Image (cartoon, helix red, strand yellow):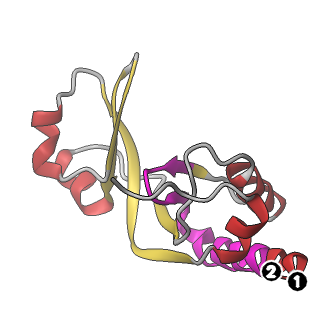
Amino acid sequence: MALRGGTDLQELLASMEASVSEESFVFCCFPNGSIEALAEHHPLGLFWENEGLTAILSLESAGRAGVETEPSFRRISLAVHSSLEAVGLTAAISSALAEAGISANVVAAFYHDHIFVQDEKAELALDTLQALSRSAKLTLK
């Protein structure tokens, strides 16, 4: 069994290391989709909604699947093991990015959080999150 992640917000922010993917992704919905039909496109993530199966596909896979490839997003992964019960991490990240004019599509996975941001704002988003982490480190001292 894996260790439970951290819950202290300041410690999570101070210890998080953000990295941005080189690859771009798109969010798309398959109204009558099945996981089996999408398997060949190697989705990064799937989520069932009332309207259909939402998939996060690489830009290349989305093109092969014949779905819209805009808008496209880059994935920022946070190398900090936060608990799924941690309070405030998503809010802190979203607030910092919102202040910089960047939308944040957050996916919380078991070990890490991943934020999908507009392609053209990926580097600014990375800088913003690194500044947030540096600020939290100063608070802990």
Query: Given this view, does label 2 or label 1 mark the residue nearer the observer?
Result: 1
Q: Amino acid at mark 1?
A: Lys
Q: Residue placed at 10% from the left, 49% from the top? A: 40
Q: Position of residue 124 (x, y in %)?
A: 68, 76
Q: Amino acid at mark 2?
A: Lys
Q: Residue placed at 57% from the left, 49% from the top? A: 105
Q: Residue placed at 67% from the left, 54% from the top? A: 7
**Label 1: how many Cα within 10 Å (few below 14, some 14–19, many 20+):** few
Label 2, on which residue? 137
Could you tell me which quadrant the C terminus lies in? bottom right
Height in image: 126 above or below 7?
below
Q: Position of residue 11 (x, y in %)?
A: 73, 69
For the residue pair 52 and 14, the one nearer the viewer reads as: 14
Q: Quadrant of residue 123?
A: bottom right
**Label 2: how many Cα within 10 Å (few below 14, some 14–19, many 20+):** some
Q: Which residues are magenta?
A: 106-134
Height in image: 37 above or below 110?
above
The answer to if 130 sits in the magenta stretch is: yes
Label 1, on which residue? 141
The answer to if 19 sits in the magenta stretch is: no
Height in image: 134 above or below 107?
below
What is the C-alpha distance between the residues marked 2 and 1?
7 Å
* Local SS, label 2: helix
Q: Are marks 2 and 1 in contact (CB under 8 Å)?
A: yes
